[in-house]
Image (cartoon, helix red, strand yellow):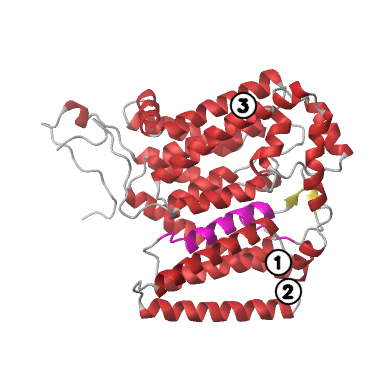
Amino acid sequence: MTLLATEPRRSAFAPPSARRAPSLRPARMATAALVAMVVLLSGSVLLGLGIPYGSQPGPIFAKIHPATYWSIVTVVLWGMARGGVGRLVASTAIERPGAMLFGFGIALVVFHAAVVVKLPIAPVIDTFVLPLALFVALLQLERLDLRRLELALHAVMGLNAALGLFEYASGWRLTPIFDPDGSMLTFDWRSSALFGHPLTNAFVTGNYVVALAFGASPRLPAGVRLGLGSLNALALIAFGGRVAMVLAGMMAVFAFGLGAVRLMVGRRFALRDAVFAIAFVTVGVLLLVLLIDAGGADRFLARFSDDQGSAQSRVNMFRVFGVLTWEQFLLWPEAELVAQAQRDFSLRIGIESSEIGFATSYGVVVTVVFFATLAAFLREVVRATSPRAWWTVLYFVGVTAASIGIATKTTMLSLFVVTTFALMRDEDAGPPRRAHDPAQPPC
């Protein structure tokens, strides 16, 4: 008996297509590596490694995330395993038309950025090509692969929350925090943890809390679910994301309210789950009160009392449109004019709304068309997982609408795709059926 998993031996009398079917192992290993790169290689980590990924001078190829390059390799490997890249793309377009529309939307923005408004295309490629390729790769995984991804993500989120709280208490940082101009920030108290930037951590952690509140990973024991949810909810204080924390908190309270209503109308529940829920809520509230009483949340609460002009910047961002002509407003904003307006209106970090930021960069017409294709893509993510994922989509839309989000170079959408596939799928859902798949020969 061997301890190594081997592929089943194919009979010499099997159909020729079955005998020639390529192994799925390289593509599966490439997908695992791709997910690890998306989760662990943040922009801050790349800058810390000396790769000029941010706004510093450097070669153009260094401005694109390594995971984006690897995602193309991964899709090619899956194409080879599924009978050809063209076949894989065609089947995905037929089965997931929203993904095809999203691809057209990305092509439109890339063309518009490169030819019309003369903006760098690296942010568009990293922010949108990577999650689309990741979506195609994750669609190919079997149920067991997705189950392993789910368990690995729970472990990563637990470690990330614990690390964030330790950084918050100690002042030590695993990953340095960098300013948009590439300089290291030494005065920022917010934790960087595994995802590199505090606001990225806040987004991913809030998304995780919302997913657990709305029934993610139904096989997960109630005690583990409540423990991970409580730990990550507490870690939101360490990451300092106001929008992420408020929105995640409101949605979690709404989810618990829905659960209470179901119980009152007669839904059955396990006594053990009720004991765990009462215990964790009691301990969680007690710890939160002790944390606030000891001054441990003072820095976070100060962000609400003194936002350092963040609220005013959200008002000023609309003034940028005032410097544009109607033609520029609709179709081709002038990049230098917009950049000067941001400086004049004290928008140093950027326009803190993905939709407004897109409109000032590419024009209203292109923005409307592109966000329509993005909505189609998000619908496909829900279709590929479960209707519960609409709650995390709502969270994603809310956070990006109130932050720079996907209007700049970020892996937020890629991280959202990973967490949704790992946590929000139906347990009985497997990979989509493919007619005449050479890797799955008929019996």
Q: Are marks 2 and 1 in contact (CB under 8 Å)?
A: yes
Instruction: Classify mark 2: helix, strand or loop.
Output: loop
Q: Is residue 272 magenta?
A: no
**Residue type, mark 1 in image:** Tyr
User: Whole-Å distance between the Cαs marked 3 and 2?
Assistant: 44 Å
The quadrant holding residue 268 is bottom left
Q: Which-is-in-front pick, marks 1 and 3? A: 3
Q: Position of residue 241 (x, y in %)?
A: 68, 58
- Relative depth, front residue between 7 and 217: 217
- Sequence-first tag of 2 and 1: 1
Exactly how many numbered labels are in the figure? 3
Tell me the residue that label 1 is attached to.
168
Q: Is residue 163 visible?
A: yes
Tell me the residue that label 2 is attached to.
296
Q: Are marks 3 and 2 in contact (CB under 8 Å)?
A: no
* Label of residue 109 in the image: 3
Q: Is residue 305 left or right of residue 280?
A: right
**Residue at the image position 72 percent from the left and 69 percent from the top:** 170
**Residue at the image position 84 percent from the left and 30 percent from the top:** 323
**Residue at the image position 61 percent from the left and 54 percent from the top:** 203
Q: Position of residue 347 (x, y in %)?
A: 82, 42
**Residue type, mark 3 in image:** Val
